[in-house]
Image (cartoon, helix red, strand yellow):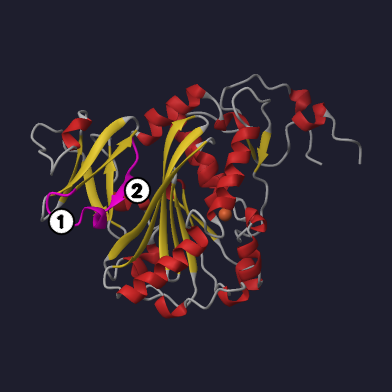
Amino acid sequence: MPPRNHKKWLATPKIEYISSECYNNYEIYEQEIEHIFAKVWVPMCHKSEMANKGDFRSSQIAFQNVVAVNHGDNIKVYLCPQIDRLTGNGISVDGLTELHSGVQHGGMVWVTLDPNPTQSIDEWTCGAFDCIAEAIDTEEMEVFHYHKSIIDTNYKLWHDTNSEFYHDFMHYHNRVTGFNDAYFARKNIPFDNGHVNVSSFTVQYEEYEGFEDRGELSFPNLPPNQWYMVDLFPGFNFNLRGSAYRSDSVTPLGPNKVLIEFRGYGLKKDTPEERATRIEHHNSIWGPFGRNLHEDLIGVAGQGTTMREGTEARRILHGRHEGGTIHDEVGMRHYYAEWGKHLGVSPENPLGHAVEDDMVVAAE
Ligand SMILES: [Fe+2]
């Protein structure tokens, strides 16, 4: 095979790809805020974080301050330009603009900045939660863990790490507890609006030294030791590992900076002993000092470094076709088709460079 010199490295492959310029251009970032984050339904928090009448939870979406307020018989979300209103006990919502919102999919508080949303929450999520609905909607859930990370990387690289699974080779835990025939048969299933979910298999926790079977505390209607994931466009992930549930929410802070909020959930009815076990199960995989989460964070920080603004554009290949199974890149292709539609650009060439025909050669 001839050496892959600089010209070959930059050549256009004959398989699916996107440009690294999707990840590091400031104008694209601004377009994403305006045309994606200011339009879509965002799962901003969980109702258990504001359990009592008068409780509130603030956040920021597309540079707008928003606040979710528990009014006792319902939860409403408002634009809240003056953040100092949130200090002290409770909040007066007089004069605040109410946003479209709702509580769905396991008690998440959803809101959109769009004053005239064309889709309801259900129409937006369009079936992506069906695979875990009976597990997360049968019993009330409760947030037991919250932490956030600010990472020098593009928000889409975090969503990518939840969407492509070939990086599982990086995770020692997943190599040991998975990677059997059932793991490789898991399916990536695309849904409208850019969403994907990943079907389950039985995780062999006892294969990992010091870990044990997690079947006893499985969520309702869930066989023991299952692992489902829901990847919701444009950057929200819901991850059910049998006895514990996790959600990730991204807030882009720049082309190469993202705030990620991580929440862990148990069941409201848990006994203190059950809750302690769920927390241990959650933290052993997903806590800041757990087995997997920091590996993902190191991975996306490295990707962010290599693709930061000013680096030479290169192609990110999405060419794996494996019948929609776990390492197939169908989820990546599905996401970026939707992303390009929202921005009115081609992810292969988001800045619209002139393409030279002689650069088009087959990938080797
Ligand atoms: Fe990972």
Q: Residue at x 73, y 39 (%)?
A: 14
Q: Which residue is mark 1?
A: 52
Q: Position of residue 342 (x, y in %)?
A: 44, 34
| Residue shown at the point (25%, 37%) measured from the top left | 66
Q: Quadrant of ligand 1?
A: bottom right
Left or right: where 25 falls relative to 218 = right
Q: Residue furthest right?
A: 2
| Residue 346 location (% of width, % of height) | 56, 31
Q: Compared with residue 349, is residue 68 higher up or lower down, i.e. above or below? A: below
Q: Is residue 19 visible?
A: no
| Image quarter hosting the C terminus | top right
Residue type of the residue flagged with mark 2: Trp
Q: Residue at x 40, y 30 (%)?
A: 33
Quarter of the view holding residue 251: top left
Q: Secondary structure at mark 1?
A: loop
Query: Mark 1 Cα within 10 Å, few/some/many (few <14, many 20+)?
Result: few
Residue segment shown in magenta: 39-55
Q: Is residue 350 above or below residue 239?
A: above
Residue farthest left in this picture: 94
Residue 237 in picture, x, y percent from top left: 44, 52
Mark-to-mark CA distance, 2 and 1: 28 Å
* Crowding near the residue tagged with mark 2, few <14, some 14–19, many ≥20 C-alpha atoms within 10 Å: many
> 330 or 283, which lies in front?
283
Residue hosting label 2:
124
166 left or right of 47? right
| Quarter of the N terminus within the rendering | top right
Q: Which of the pair 287/77 is nearer the observer?
A: 287
172 horizontally vs 86: left or right: right
User: Was residue 48 drawn as part of the magenta stretch in this picture?
Assistant: yes
Q: Secondary structure at mark 2?
A: helix
Q: Nearer the viewer, residue 192 or 162?
A: 162
Residue 228 coordinates in the image, percent (x, y): 48, 64
